[in-house]
Amino acid sequence: MTSQDTDRPAVDLAILREELIRRRLRGTGLASDSVIGHADRNAPLPLSPGQRQMWFLSRLDPDNPEYLVPIVLRLRGPADVTALRQAFRHLVMRHEILRTRYALADGQPVQVIEQPGPADLAVRDLSDVDPAERERLLTEQIERETLTPLDLSLDLPVRGTVLKLADDDHTLVLIVHHIACDEASVGILVTEMGELYSAFRAGRYPRSSLRTELGRACSASASNGRHHPPAASGAMAALCAQLHCRPYLLGR
C-alpha cells in the first residue's frame, strides 16, 4: 500500500465535508428525499439525509468550527439587553429545529425535540476593562465563541452571547450549527430576531406567526433543495436597521 492510498480516506472526508457545507449554505443537499411534513411524535424521529450526513461528519470531527454558522453584530447606541434576551428565548421557543438534540436509539441517530424552556443569551460585561484593551478582548471573545463546538447530543444547536463594552456599545454573537441552519434559515432567523426584538423593546408581545416555521424550512431544504432561500444579506440589513447595528467582520 502506498502513502497515497493511506491518505485517500482523509482527503475524501475533507472533500465531502466541504461539498456538504457548500450545498447546505446554498440550501441544497447531497441526497434528496420528499418534503418533510408533520412527523409522528410517538415514534423515534429519524434524520433527513442532509441531517444524517452533517451528523456523521460532526461525529467524525466534532471540534471542527466549519460546522458552525456565526452571526456577529455590533450594536452602537442604547441597546435593550432584556429585550434581546426575550427575543432570543422566544425565537428558540417557537422553532423546534433550534430545540433539537441528536441521540442514538438502537444504533441509529434520532431527533430529540426538547420542550420549550429556558434558552437565554449569556451576557458578559467587558465595560470595566481598560478601553485600550477592550477591542482586543472583544475579538478574542468572538473568536472563542466561533471556535467553541456544539455537542449535538447534549447541546441545543444554537447559542447566543451579548458582549457589553459600554452602555452604548454591545456585540451580539449567535452561533448556529449547520445541522439546523442553511442560507435559507439564516435569513429567517435574523429577520425574526429583529422583529422580536423590536416588539419586546416596544413592550408588545410578538404576533404568533412571523415567518415560515424554521424547522420545516430547514428540514425541507436539507432534504431536497427545493426551498428557494431569501437573501440572507437582505435579512441581515433589515435586522441591522432595527438594532441600529452593523455586521462585525471576522478574520476567517
Image (cartoon, grey):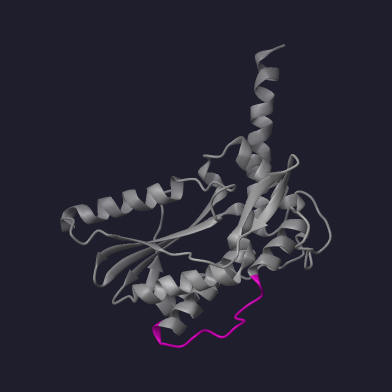
Residue sticking out furthest to the top: 1
- The answer to whether residue 217 is seen in the rendering is yes
- Residue 226 figure quarter: bottom right
Q: Which residues are magenta?
A: 201-213
Could you tell me residue 148's position as x and y percent? 45, 46
Rendered view: 188 above or below 67:
below
Taking the spot 46% from the left edge, 88% from the top edge, the residue there is: 204
Could you tell me residue 250's position as x and y percent? 41, 53
- The answer to whether residue 244 is seen in the rendering is no
Quarter of the N terminus within the rendering = top right
In the picture, measured across the screen, residue 80 lies left or right of residue 31, that is: left
Could you tell me residue 94's position as x and y percent? 59, 72
In the picture, measured across the screen, residue 35 lies left or right of residue 2, that is: right
Taking the spot 41% from the left edge, 87% from the top edge, the residue there is: 203
In the picture, measured across the screen, residue 107 lies left or right of residue 155, that is: right
Residue 145 falls inside the magenta stretch:
no
Query: Which sits in the foreground, 122 or 10?
Result: 122
- Residue 160 figure quarter: bottom left
Could you tell me residue 158's position as x and y percent? 52, 58
Rendered view: 1 above or below 221:
above
Count the marks: 0
Query: Which sits in the foreground, 6 or 233?
Result: 6
In the picture, measured across the screen, residue 190 lies left or right of residue 41, that is: left
Residue sticking out furthest to the front: 42
Which secondary structure is most common in the magenta stretch? loop
Taking the spot 44% from the left edge, 74% from the top edge, the residue there is: 86
Rendered view: 192 above or below 182:
below
Residue 207 falls inside the magenta stretch:
yes
